[in-house]
Image: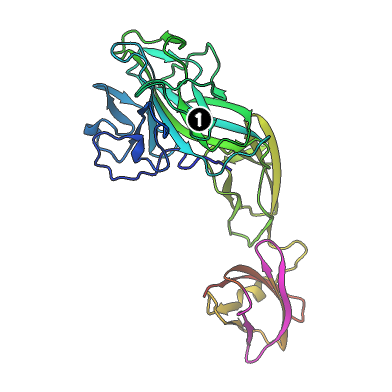
Amino acid sequence: MNLVPNPSFEQLDSSCTKLCVSIYFCTSWDSLVNGGGSAAAVLNSCYNYTTGFSVPKNILGGTFCFQVPKTGNSYAYLEYFKNSAPSVSWRSYAQAPLKTTLTNGKVYCVTYYASLSNRCQYAVDELGAYLDNGSIASIAPNREAIVSPQIKSPSGVFYKDTLNWMKVQGTFTATGNESYITIGNFKSWAAATYSLSYPTAPGFVAEYYVDDVSVIDLNLLAYAGPDKYILNGDSAFIGQPPEIGLECAWYNGTVTIGTGGGLWVKPNTTTTYIVQQNICGLIKSDTVTVTVGYAGVNESELFSKNISFYPQPSKDILNISLNFFYEKSIEIKIIDLNGRLVRGLELGVRSGVAQLETTEFSNGIYIVQIKNLKEQIAIKRLVIAR
């Protein structure tokens, strides 16, 4: 999955009272840990507008600016280029340790999104992401770190959109040394290529909002989850929890029904869903079937309506009450939500009640199929909670 912690800069280490909101106060993120470069800022909707670092409205360099986060309530703010004295090559960086060191020979997809601040006169190309062991450093305090990033936006394409989020994405083969990701501009001032995109803007700079950073195994398998069994009227979650950088589209046949790693569905008939995963242009698919009821089962509506469970949730003993039905015994099948038969047995009925011992079942939700001697069948839901 995504190996970048806190990928959309949502988690903060401090309260929303700071006047200078450095990237240091953003969980897992830092400037260059090995020295140099100025610290990026983190902007969050919890900050007061008067501090300048609020979202979506903010005041940067005395200029009113506006940008809605790509995801959540926060984003980073980095200086990529400066064309005025003093310190014309002033740069800021955002750096984070990866959740695990990358594997030698494995190909990874690296992505982040950028949007130019509307206070900027300039836009630059080759917005970069550099992956190493954390040893990257700048040539002097607050200056540039000159390296060749593995990931960069196209040369000659100047990222000047101040309204929409622009994707920076690419793939590379790891050497097994990479345990940090650093976002920024890695060219010297002399080598930087820039465009005077907004001459009337007040800032002699190219400064970008950054959001949704991800590093994902290019060959990650698509995952729609295990097949599900539900009762009519119930919902089921399919796939996996949504995650930054995991681009998925879900289909019922050819109809798009949602996006993200997973979603809730509520079919009224047995349905097969398809997830299509796109990682740096590599498309992979998987399917999941949600069965509603049980095919081939002739359920008696009256029989079903007159069966009740108590207590529910159950801890040790489940009482199955058969109101208005005289039965000597009933056949029980306990099935988990992945369709596996957990237990099948026959229970005797006394005074209209059968008792099922539930101590052997783990906490969770089960489907109970009840059949009498007349082949009438009812399907009920059982909840075990201790």
**Which residue is depicted at the point 37% across and 15% down?**
89
**Which residue is depicted at the point 44% across and 22% down?**
145
Q: Secondary structure at mark 1?
A: strand
- Residue 274 placement (x, y as % from top left): 68, 43
**Magenta region, residue range:** 335-361
Front-most of residues 378 and 114: 114
Q: Is residue 238 left or right of residue 208?
A: right
> Vertical placement of 50 versus 79: above or below?
below
The quadrant of the picture occupied by the N terminus is top right
> Vertical placement of 196 versus 320: above or below?
above
- Residue 168 placement (x, y as % from top left): 53, 25
Q: Which residue is mark 1?
A: 112
> Vertical placement of 385 versus 41: above or below?
below
> Vertical placement of 167 versus 178: above or below?
above
Q: Amino acid at mark 1?
A: Tyr
**Which residue is depicted at the point 66% across and 46% down?**
223
Quadrant housing residue 340: bottom right
Q: Is residue 227 left or right of residue 82?
A: right
Quadrant housing residue 12: top left
